[in-house]
Image: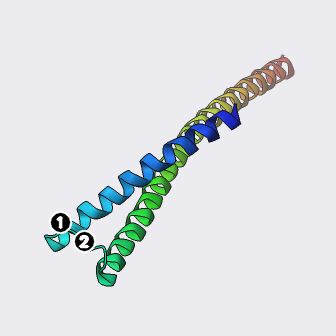
Amino acid sequence: MEAQRLREQLAKLPEREAARKARERKVFESAHRRAPRPSSASDSRSLELIGMYEARQGGLVAEAEALREECRRLAEELRALTLALTLTLTLTLTLTLTLTLTLTLTLTRSCAHATT
């Protein structure tokens, strides 16, 4: 299964490389208002820099998405912990009130028996 996934990725590599080069060329043409010259070192360097920028940009986009997903996961975890804490505090308060009422009733009965 993993080998099949890797074969599929490898098969798509030439297509992705061609798309990358086309994007770089389009950015170059947009910036320079002309096509890059194959024999120009300056144009080659510009295309290389465009490629480096786009690769970095793609990495940042992927990182931002991973961070958004982590934020969603942490927010959900926080909601669950908040609910658990709320339930724990409610239970603690209920038990405290029950014990207070029981103690008050016991003391009231003790005082009533002591005065009779």
**Which of the marked residues, 1 or 2, is nearer the chain's N terminus?**
1
Q: Is residue 83 left or right of residue 35?
A: right
| Residue assigned mark 1 | 30
Say which of 8 and 105 sits in front: 8
Total number of numbered discs in the rendering: 2
On screen, 23 above or below 115?
Answer: below
The C terminus is located in which quarter? top right
Say which of 41 and 102 sits in front: 41
On screen, 43 above or below 60?
Answer: below
Q: CA distance from mark 1 to mark 2?
A: 11 Å
Say which of 11 and 84 sits in front: 11
Q: Residue at x 31, y 78 (%)?
A: 39
Q: Residue at x 62, y 39 (%)?
A: 7
Amino acid type of the residue tagged 2 in the rendering: Pro
Instruction: Indicate the colouring scheme.
Output: rainbow
Disc 1, SS: helix
Nearer the observer: mark 1 or 2; the answer is: 2
What is the crowding at mark 1: few (fewer than 14 residues within 10 Å), some, or many (at least 20)? few
Q: Is residue 16 left or right of residue 89?
A: left
On screen, 73 above or below 19?
Answer: above
Q: Is residue 101 left or right of residue 114?
A: left
| Residue assigned mark 2 | 36
Amino acid type of the residue tagged 1 in the rendering: Ser
- Name, please, the residue furthest toward the left: 33
Q: Residue at x 43, y 49 (%)?
A: 16
The N terminus is located in which quarter? top right
Q: Residue at x 80, y 26 (%)?
A: 107
Label disc, if present, on residue 41 of the rendered structure: none
